[in-house]
Amino acid sequence: MNEDWEKRVVAAWATLDDYPEERAAEFRAVIDALVAELPDGSPLGLFEQASAWDSTGHSDKAVPLYREALARGLSRESGYKGRRAKIQLSSSLRNTGQAEEGVKLLTPELDGPSDELDDAVRATLALCLSSLGRDREGLSLVLGALAPHLPRYQRSMARYARALVDPED
């Protein structure tokens, strides 16, 4: 979509906190109005609608929309939003009792091209793993993501993170 539409979407999202829970439908209506400007079935529109449902506490309604957005080529349209959709879908899957599917969706992202979403991938994957009782793996991911941001102890924290899942390390 064009730059003006994207700016208006960003502006709409900046108002999310202005809508308390009892007015969540109003926020979704703002997003729906923007989506209505797109061609029917646009993966960008589906992603924004999924995100709106998700951000207003309805993971169950978000899951099919995220899936459809990805199936319709969201990642080709916007690699960044495609990656966000995978993160958000995995979180929603976890929230709806499908954490294993979230792990399967996000694990390949660990080896994908690096960007500013890397830590979000790891944090969400860690939550999915924890929901499956795989806390050591989740903690390893979180510590590994945190280590580069520390002012000191980066090497030791990275080593400890690896040792949680590989005692030989």
Image (cartoon, rainbow, N blue to C red):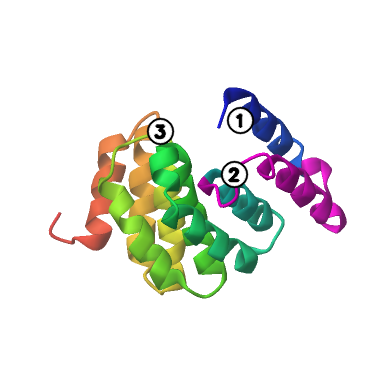
Q: In what quadrant of the picture does the C terminus appear?
A: bottom left
Q: Is residue 63 left or right of residue 32?
A: left
Q: Nearer the viewer, residue 151 or 55?
A: 55
**Crowding near pointer 3: few (<14 within 10 Å), some, many (20+)?**
few
Q: Are marks 3 and 1 in contact (CB under 8 Å)?
A: no
19 within the magenta span? yes
Residue found at x 73% / y 36%: 12
Residue found at x 82% / y 47%: 19
Q: Mark 1 or 2 closer to N-term?
A: 1
Judging by the rendered image, the residue that carries numbered circle 2 is 39
Give amino acid for label 1.
Glu
Where does residue 128 sit, x and y in percent of width and height?
A: 44, 65
**Cα distance, mark 2 to mark 3?**
42 Å
**Cα distance, mark 1 to mark 2?**
15 Å
SS at badge 2: loop
SS at badge 1: helix
Where does residue 138 sit, x and y in percent of width and height?
A: 38, 60
State the extent of the magenta-drawn residues as a range. 17-43
